[in-house]
Image (cartoon, rainbow, N blue to C red):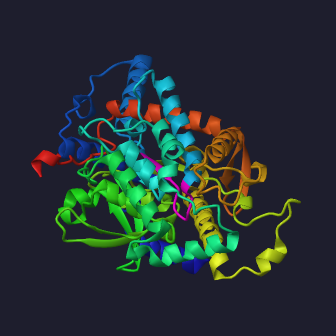
Amino acid sequence: MAAAEEMLVVARKDGEEEPSIDTDKLSYEIFSILESKFLFGYDDRSLWLPKLPQSGALQAAASADVDAAAAFKSQRGKVCILSIDGGGGIGMRGILPGKALAYLEQALRSKSGDPDARISDYFDLAAGTGVGGFFAAMLFATHDGSRPAYRADETWRFLANSGRRIYRKPSSSSSGAQSRSAFLRCVLRSYGGYGLVETSTKAMERAMKDTFGESLTLRDTVKPLLIPCYDIRSSGPLVFSRADALESESYDFRLWEVCRATWAEPGRFEPVEMRSVDSSTVCFGVDGGIAMSNPTAAAITHVLHNKQEFPFVRGVEDLMVLSLGCGAPSSIVVPEAASGHLEYQNLRQWGAKEWARPLARIASDGTADLVDHAVALAFGQSRSTSYVRIQANETSIRPCRTDVDCDPSPANVEVLLSLAEEMLKQKNVESQLFGGRQICEQTNMEKLDWFAGELILEHQRRSCRIAPTVVFRQTVSNSNR
């Protein structure tokens, strides 16, 4: 004990004091004011002019008001992130997050009093994979450089109305074995110009071009956008980013091709060979879900490292994240017999061919859940106020057909719309710190209402702060390229 005290005395020199928390806080506040003034040109005289002497309670009250106002003005604010799951053959199941987006946008309009409010008005960045990437591009793409091209309810309506163009089925006239054999031949011969895969690919390409045109690129978005695919050439994920596109045309790709790549489920659509605007970068892309079916972690990492557009973000405490899942009902993975039990005997006879798509679904949904849990751990105690995950609770979702993801029929669309409404009414499920998942008191619908209110409040507060929460880089119009 005496030795420890002696070391402590030696460590302290005469006249020196240990730094305190209050000292660190004061230093941070001083440098925040200086940084705001000299970096961004703000000149709030009340922050640096000496205060006139006052007396008694009036002086104390005035001092408290000034301190509160200064503290509020120097707040960093929160960067708002939207993340949409996809990939892994989710396809038509994208109707679920599409309906959640439509509900959120309607809540924003109702709470803000703005009948033309859009998702992109309140989020600072959108990330999406597969059909989720397509939705994110729809909500953030712009033809005029100012307003987004599509409303939120047009996302799920695209699948409902155009699903038949993209998802085509083999003829039902042949027997099951003949159909499977024909399907395999189509897959193997697709690159030779034959088969169902080529037909579906052409249909998807036409749908992508109809949605975005052929001239819009990653630069033609109102705010930052992240969309991943898997690049076969480099054997790794490639994340298409507006920030990279603004940096160089070597990383600027056409939006319709970006969405075509992230949605290119192997075996159903052909891979896409795509080139950047200046043709210097080549990507051979397939389904983004192979790499990251849940892009939330990638979006958070991008914000934390993109100091040009998000200069004051220090950690997850400066973020608000909404993550939308595509539902993961267990009954869509393997078939069931008429009795409702698993066809165990049939499963025992499955080979690589039969397991291919179920394994893709299992891996995609499992990876999405793993990312959700990791992000919840990262947010810690603030996860309930800064991180919201909207996902169907599979324990209360009724059984679905095994082809629910690729069946564009009106009957299946009705089933998915019903599931989406059921998902919104379900109790929200949160990942707990080392404790699995917990069912909350609020429903998913109530969570979205609350999150909409928080988005509007953050949007309003930004006009009162000294330093900007975000500093978006300006896009270059097509006419100036």
Give the vertical position of 446 relative to 11 (above or below): above
Give the vertical position of 46 relative to 268 (above or below): above
Query: Percent from the top left, x then y, of residue 353?
Result: 63, 78
Give the vertical position of 120 relative to 333 (above or below): above
Residue 87 on the magenta span: yes
Answer yes or no: is residue 321 visible: no
The foreground one among 434 and 87 is: 87
- At horizontal 46% and vertical 61% (from top left) the residue drawn is 200
Query: Percent from the top left, x then y, of residue 416?
Result: 64, 46
The foreground one among 333 and 307 is: 333
Residue 298 on the magenta span: no
Residue farthest to the right, as pictured: 339
In the image, 321: left or right of 227? right
- At horizontal 32% and vertical 47% (from top left) the residue drawn is 212
Q: Residue 63's image quarter?
A: top left
Query: Percent from the top left, x then y, of residue 58?
Result: 41, 17
Q: Quadrant of the N terminus?
A: bottom right
Magenta-drawn segment: 80-91
- At horizontal 40% and vertical 29% (from top left) the residue drawn is 460
